[in-house]
Structures are given as structure tokens and as C-alpha cells.
Image (tube, rainbow, N blue to C red):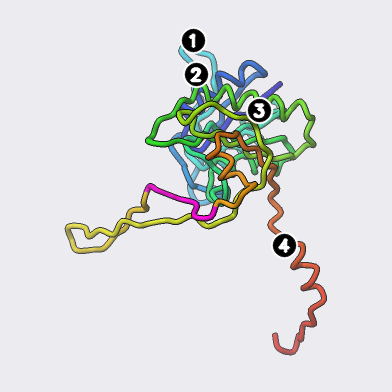
Amino acid sequence: MRILLTNDDGFYAPGLRALRKELQQIGTVTVVAPATEQSAAGHSVTLLTPLLVNEVLDDDGKPIGWAVEGRPADCVKLGLLELLREPPDLIVSGLNAGSNAGINVLYSGTVAAAIEGAFYGHTAIACSLEYEKKIYDFPTAARHARRVVEQILANKPAKGSLFNVNIPVLENGPIKGVKVLPQNVTRYTEKFDRRVNPRGRTYFWTGPDFECPYPHPDTDVPALAEQYITVTPLKFDLTDHDKLASMQGWVWNNADL
């Protein structure tokens, strides 16, 4: 099996390194990932500057993949269209430092990279690890992620299938199991730290704490808090089909346009 591995934390992130080691048990892994951290880059792509690419070798001089000075979605595009000699059987994005559950799916560069892979008709899986107090056990989380990936593949998903996997805080206790759940769509609470620079200009830092005030039951956010790995199938058609059906019955007066 040929696996394209990417992320948004950067080519040298420990989460990617741990997941690469685990995925090598099930296939040949080629990394195409951002050269620097691109957290919360969403599905942005680079248009106005060149995408510089550097091939990276391991300690034995064997190729690992390519570090790209671009966004996660750029990496997948370049990997599929320019860098890989053969198309991958699977695209995995992660292992992200921090969960990408709930509405964070919309901001996540990790998920965006997986979405880009699904655009091109490949099975794509985003994997993330929730944390507290900046404590990450990436090797253990990567083992959990690999086992979930294997189980997804065992069910032979259709080409272009897209999955979002989140692993709970490992320090809070053993994993209770896996739950397939929808994403929670509650807006998170956010805060900005207001400051004034030495020249008297006001600026803001985005606060580090994001909390979900209404974690609806039977969604990914509360299940993570209960020590379950969550798996959510995603799609990238943002059309509101229910509203579309009702709007098609509207009468449009072209004279008012």
C-alpha cells in the first residue's frame, strides 16, 4: 500500500514522525508536508508566491519525502500532481497536536489536507490528538490512530471517502472504545488579549483557550471528553439541500435586478 502522509504542524513535527513510524507497518509512506507550522490555515492555497520544495532524506540517505513552503492543501496538490511517481492508495493527515473536533473542522489545516485528497478521489483520513497542559504522548496516540486507519480500510470505503479521527487526552485514562459520531457545531467561546505596543498602537493576541459551551450529546466533543476515540465521516458539499429545495419554489422578479 502506498500512503501519502501530510499535516499542518510541519514536516518535522513529532506527531507526524510518530504516525509515519506506525503507518510504515501497513505500507510505504511518503511525506509531503509544510516546511513550517500551518495550524488553522484551513483550506487556503498559495497563489501569489512560489511553492519552494526541498527533498528530505533520513539518516541513511534514504528519501522521506518533501518539505513544502506552502499550506497543507498545497502539499497534497503537489504530492498528487507533481512529486509522487505513483498515486497513493491512502492519504493520511496528522498526527495533529490538538483535537480537530466540532466546528474546528472548518479551521483545521489537518482536515483541509485530507479534504484535498478526497477531492482527487482518494480515501483520506485526518488524525488528531487532544491534549491538556501541552502533554503529548504521540507514540501511543499514533498506535491508536494506525489501528483505526486499519479498521477503516478493512471496511473498503469508496474512493473519495473522507474521515476525521480524534483521539482523547491519554493522560485522563484508558481509551474506552471508538464511536462514530457527527461533529458538534456549537460555536466555541473565544477571547482576545488586548495590548498596546510601545508606539501606542493597540493589538490583539488570540487567546489559547477554546471551550465548547454546549457540547450536544451524541456528538464528537463530549465523546472525546468521555475518553472515546471519535470517527466522523465528512463531505465537502456545503450546499444546504433542504433549503435549496424550498428556494427552488421561490418566484424571482427579474425586473428588480
213 magenta-colored: yes
Above or below residue 148? Residue 257 is below
Position of the N terminus by quadrant:
top right
Distance, label 2 to label 3, CA atoms, is 28 Å
Residue lying at the far right of the rendered structure: 249
How far across and down, in percent of the image, does residue 111 sit? Answer: 59, 42
Distance, label 4 to label 2, CA atoms, is 46 Å
- Specify start and end residues of the magenta stretch as a single range: 208-214
User: Which callout, 4 or 2, points to the residue nearer the camera?
Assistant: 4
Tag count in the figure?
Answer: 4
Q: Quadrant of residue 32?
A: top right
Cβ–Cβ under 8 Å for marks 2 and 3: no
Q: For mark 3, what is the residue?
A: 148
Distance, label 4 to label 3, CA atoms, is 30 Å
Our reading of the magenta stretch's main secondary structure is: loop
Which one is nearer the viewer's eye here, 178 or 125?
178
**Disc 1 crowd, CA 10 A, few/some/many (<14, 14-19, 20+):** few
Q: Secondary structure at mark 2?
A: strand
How far across and down, in percent of the image, does residue 215 sit? Answer: 55, 51
Distance, label 1 to label 4, CA atoms, is 52 Å
User: Left of 95 or right of it: where is 80?
Assistant: right
Q: For mark 4, what is the residue?
A: 240
Check disc 1 and give the amino acid type.
Answer: Asp
Residue lying at the far left of the rendered structure: 198
Q: Secondary structure at mark 1?
A: loop
Q: For mark 2, what is the residue?
A: 57
The numbered mark, 1 or 4, whose residue comes first in the sequence reads: 1
**Disc 3 crowd, CA 10 A, few/some/many (<14, 14-19, 20+):** some
Cβ–Cβ under 8 Å for marks 2 and 1: yes
